[in-house]
Image: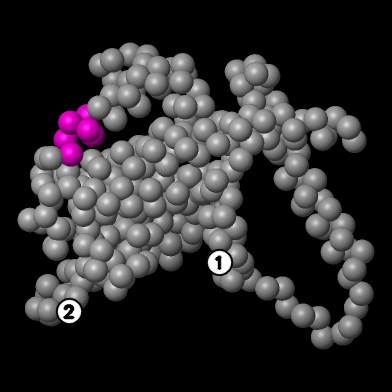
Amino acid sequence: MDTIITEIKASFRRGDVVTKFIYANVFIYLLITVVLVINRLFVRNAVSLVEIFALPASVSRILHQPWSLFTYMWMHVEIFHLFFNALWLYCFGKLFLRFFSAKHFVGTYVFSGLMGGLFYVVSYNLFPYFSGVLDYSTMVGASAAVLGLVAAVAYREPNYRIRLMFFGNVQLKWLALCFLILDMCLVTSENGGGHLSHLGGALGGFLFALFLNRGVDITRWIVWIVDKISSLFERKPRQPKMKVNYGSRAADYEFNARRKERDEEIDRILDKIKLSGYESLTAAEKKTLFDVSRR
């Protein structure tokens, strides 16, 4: 058992941001499932984790649990819901990283999830059709966040072809358009809230790619918050018992770290030029190449 846990930890540490996000969704699903099983075995009537962290449609309920606008996008209560979301997250997450950075992935996932949640809440409170179920409707799942990734890549590379079983090679723009039309047709179905959130998530991914193409990253604030929170859990190096001056060594380390990050970004941009040509670069990427060429 220890070996399995060690291997999972090692896989998580070695994995890219897509792998880490999939692990996070799976872990939260397992945690919720275990708690639900324990509650049922002991016939407990305690408020479930799903009720606490799922996104309610009612504004008054959201005011009592505002964190749910963020937590809902990490939760799944059905194994097949988790499986298909994880599958799409893996496929389009990897494709996303071919054209954008890991930080863009974090920002787009969260931003699209937030947009999907807001679209769901606003729609349920705006349209009379949902008034009968407004007070007890809730939503969970990463679908809106994943559709945001799809929309961002489709806007960035609309003619990029992917192979689909039974359909062959399909351009991303047509795949994204089919998703949007399908979701719009199903907003009055039993899972209307989920389809509404898909539309909001797709809008979030589209806005991210649109503004980034103009040199503005509208998800930068999300990345900043995530970095600040992550820094709280980082292991701090032990302070030496003897007073030693490490000033120059620390400076060298920071310089090398910055240089490594810059070199990786340049390699990614050059690979992108080989794949799609110079004109496919965003304004920010062109500026990065220009700055490096002047040094």
Q: Position of residue 77 (x, y in %)?
A: 22, 56
Q: 124 and 258: which one is in front?
A: 124
> Which label is found at residue 229?
1
Q: 17 and 99: which one is in front?
A: 99
> Which label is found at residue 46?
2
Describe the element under mark 2 as helix, strand or loop.
loop
Q: Residues within 10 Å of mark 1 (few under 14, many from 20)?
A: few
Alpha carbon distance from label 2 to label 1: 30 Å
Stretch in magenta: 182-187
Residue that sits furthest to the top in the current view = 168
> What's the image's color scheme?
one colour
Residue for point 13% across, 62% down: 136
Describe the element under mark 1 as helix, strand or loop.
helix
Callout 1 amino acid: Ile
Magenta stretch contains residue 186: yes
Residue for point 22% across, 58% down: 57
Looking at the rendered image, the quarter that the N terminus falls into is bottom left
> Which label is found at residue 293?
none
Q: Position of residue 48 (x, y in %)?
A: 21, 71
Residue for point 37% across, 67% down: 67
Residue for point 81% across, 81% down: 240
**Residue 238 appearing in the image:** yes
Q: Position of residue 88 (x, y in %)?
A: 35, 37
Q: 38 and 51: which one is in front?
A: 51
